Amino acid sequence: MAFMDSPVRTHALVTLRQTGKIFPARRAGAERVEALCPTDLNVAHGEFLTIVGPSGCGKSTLLSLIAGLLRPSSGEVRIGDTLVDDPYTNLGIVFQKDLLLPWRTALDNVLIQAEVRGIGRKPLLGRAMELLELVGLQGFENFYPHELSGGMRSRVSICRALLHDPPLLLMDEPFAALDAITRDQLALDFQTFWQRDRRTVVFITHNIAEAVFLGDRVMVMTARPGKIAEMIDIDLPRPRELLVRDAPEFTRYTGRVRELFMQHGILKGR
Amino acid sequence: MSETAPTPTERAAGPGLLRHSYPIVAVVITLAVWEASVRLFKVPELVLPAPSVVFEHIWTKRELYIAFSQPTLIEILAGFAVAAVAGIGLGILVSFSDLAKRTAYPLLVSSQMVPKVAIAPVFIIWFGTGLQAKVLISFLIAFFPIMVSTMVGLEAIEADMVRLFRSMGAGAYRTFIKLRLPAALPNIFAGLKIGMSLAVVGAVVAEFVAADRGLGYYLLYANGQLDTPGVFGALLVLTVIGVVLYYMVEAVERMFVPSALSKDADPARATM
């Protein structure tokens, strides 16, 4: 098992029990959409769970359900002992778009987290600077988003999500808008960053290699209706280097994911 | 780090002084061409006076122009102030309240479809020939673009942005203060700049209908006297007032909207 090595991972932080989501018909005559089949899922403390699947497989719906931004049509979501039925605030979210406020500097964009929560800037100023330094943005604190590259903006949005030190980080295709090279760099840097405190992460991607590279477990999803096709434990030692992607044990995992997509007709093999 | 970003100095560096002198050069060239054409083609003064004649007219009647600028300026500023407060206020109300959107908004749109020049006489009947009616007309012409651009700005927020704020525990008030309002500011200022130019129009229209002083009144009077230099003199002074007020709004915008959004503050790119 991939996460036997850590004693804290004894019980789940996030628990989904028969959690499903059906969107009502948009207009008369249209069919209601079952975005997510009733799903069971446990995410352990300190686990890095990646979710990979094609567009429309309900992976973003799943993330919204965990965050309490959507209410499940069936079943329930629990984080720790809390039943999630409102937006759950003790977590950080990183979206595909960096969603930085263009009128705020990098530092102020990180600190918006404190301001919105009513904590105030002062107590978290030091932590904000520290986070920016950790992601390699020292010296860029007072730059506006339009003065930063896409990768830098993405790093700022990760700092913002972590300012209040949440136990859970949700990431919805965070690197998808970046070019392939920057994307690899961010995945590598994010792994290093994550290994410092091994916070629980649920990471959505449609990139198979990224999912295997980052995850302790990869949850493979299929579409219409969205459901879990398979859970794959990734038994690769960390820190993983980018070159591990060419190793046979790595390609065995990516091959398995591709095989699943072909079985479900998501990828046509020939 | 493999990424690079432009440094701010690259952006700021450039022929700044030269760029600022462009508008002045453009105005001077326009006046020079105007002057030369009038002299070259011997255009009668009754049809088109040369700028030198207009300036001379303004200079000799400077006391009258100064005296008549005051009431017009007050009408413009009062009309604009009411329009700004009402426009931004109604814009916020309509974008927040579904009820207001369904009831007040159609009424407000209808009020804009009434030709405002045509209802100006009605206001004179209701409110008399004093300041009140003129401010009201100026306000009515100026407020609509301010309201619409406020609405557009407040509603043009990405859905994920709102989700992000909800996950931070933000209620409607914090979302408004920290997200919607600052995001709407470039739009609001675009509306205010248009509103300012329309407030000038409104004040002149009001003075056309009923006034015994003011630049609009003088313009109409000079026209009746076939005093074309007087007409152009009034037009010129009104134009200068309008331009100065416009750039004053822009100066206020620069204080509130940081340079990071300066592209939105460029009036040439303002869509409303």
Image (spheres, helix red, strand yellow):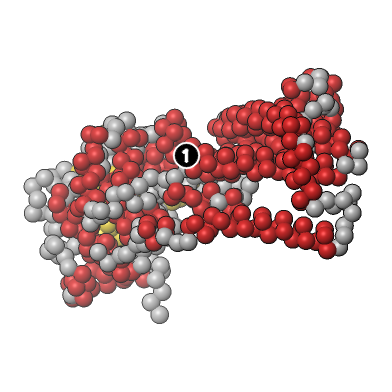
Q: Is residue B116 above or below residue A53?
A: above
Q: Name the one closer to the observer, A119 or A265.
A: A119
- Image point (44%, 33%), residue name: B177
Left-right relation of A225 to B148:
left
- Image point (62%, 58%), residue name: B25
- Image point (20%, 53%), residue name: A134
Q: Amino acid at mark 1?
A: Phe
Q: Is residue B240 above or below residue B75?
A: below
Q: Residue furthest bottom?
A: A270
Q: Name the one closer to the observer, B266 or A77.
A: B266
Residue A51: where, in percent of width, then height? 30, 57
Q: From this viewpoint, is residue A191 visible?
A: yes
Q: Quadrant of residue A88?
A: top left
Residue B58: where, in percent of width, then height? 76, 40
Residue A208: where, in percent of width, then height? 30, 66
Q: Name the one closer to the observer, B130 or A66.
A: B130
Q: Tell me the residue that label 1 is attached to.
A: B256
Q: Quadrant of residue A2?
A: bottom left
Left-right relation of A4 to B68:
left
What is the chain letter for disc 1? B
Q: Quadrant of residue B1?
A: bottom left
Residue B236: where, in percent of width, then height? 74, 44
